[in-house]
Amino acid sequence: MINKIPFALSWNCNSLSRSRLAALQLYTFSSRPCALFLSETKTDPNTTPLSLSGYVAYNKPVSRLSGGTALLVLSHYSNVAVFSRRRPELELSDHIVVVEAKFPFFPSPILLVSVYHHRSINSVRGQSWLSLKSSLSACFAFGLPVLAMGDFNARHSSWDRRRSDQFGSDLVDFCSSVSSVVLNSVFCSGSPTFPRSGSVIDLAICSEPSLVSGLSPAPSIPLLSDHLPMRLDFNPDAFAADSAQTAHSRFDFEHADWIGYSGFLNEISSRVLTDVRCALSTHKASP
């Protein structure tokens, strides 16, 4: 059964082990999120490709010891096929997966971006952070609405009340430059996503925040790791159903018989002129 409100889920699974994949399968079988943003999957690139019943999987494994991102998109929503395709030309980082998806409840395609900030160097000038921003810049310049979710490993007082760091400050400046919003600041500022340290590092960024009605950590969802899953609810009022689009027609001017039409006008013009003159004379003769 699909929830009345379409939603997406982001989860740093900290290794997508067999037991965690089984838990994910069990949860998605009943709850059916439209999209799953997975980070730090820690899967071996040489193992069996990621698969989840009812979903199209887009996976970017790095190593079974670290990193790895994936995006899973629901194959059908309310018995209507969901179109999705990977956009590798926008993946300028080893830790980002980009998918273009067209859901039946949404009037246009949307870019979904699964993010993991692999904090190998503690500097905003490090290649990992720079390539992540380059990929996000390409997505925001693509011309479609963008929703990016994942473990950004970035803290800022607008979403993490305990502290800010250089990555969070740089991310705020970046979002301002591409006219996007960190949704944690809007919906759940100060709500920890990494309970062990009480920090907020699992974020959602959107170019059109009106498309979202809610975002929050979801400790009640039975997916266990050291990060809480993040649930994002889409805004039904922002959606225009395109299942019943109004059909519009236009005249085929390019293939019209203009010679015949001209002759028709010449033929009736004399009659019209006679009728007008008759009407005028009748008008003048009337008391």
Image (cartoon, rainbow, N blue to C red):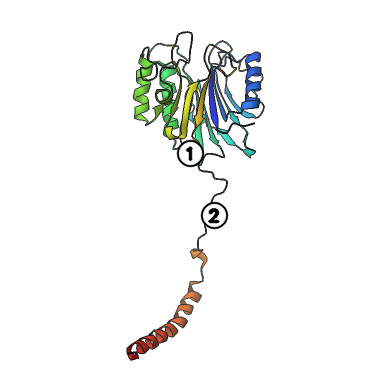
Q: Residue at x 37, y 89 (%)?
A: 282
Q: Residue at x 34, y 18 (%)?
A: 169
Q: Position of residue 195 (x, y in %)?
A: 48, 11
Q: Residue furthest front?
A: 287
Name the image quarter holding the N terminus: top right
Give the residue type at disc 2. Answer: Ala
Q: Residue at x 39, y 23 (%)?
A: 185
Q: Secondary structure at mark 1?
A: helix
Name the image quarter holding the C terminus: bottom left
Q: Badge 1 is on which residue?
A: 237
Mark 2 crowdedness (10 Å alpha carbons): few <14, some 14-19, many ≥20: few
As drawn, 252 above or below 9: below
Residue nearest the observer in this picture, 240 or 17: 240
Left or right of residue 20: residue 230: left
Q: Secondary structure at mark 2?
A: loop
Give the residue type at disc 1. Answer: Asp
Residue 208 appears in the picture as rendered:
no
Residue nearest the observer in this picture, 22 or 51: 22
Q: Which mark is residue 133?
A: none
Q: Position of residue 50 (x, y in %)?
A: 63, 22
Q: Nearer the viewer, mark 2 or mark 1?
A: 1
Mark 1 crowdedness (10 Å alpha carbons): few <14, some 14-19, many ≥20: few
As drawn, 275 above or below 33: below
Q: Badge 2 is on which residue?
A: 247
Residue 29 appears in the picture as rendered:
yes
Residue nearest the observer in this picture, 222 or 88: 222
Q: Position of residue 215 (x, y in %)?
A: 47, 25
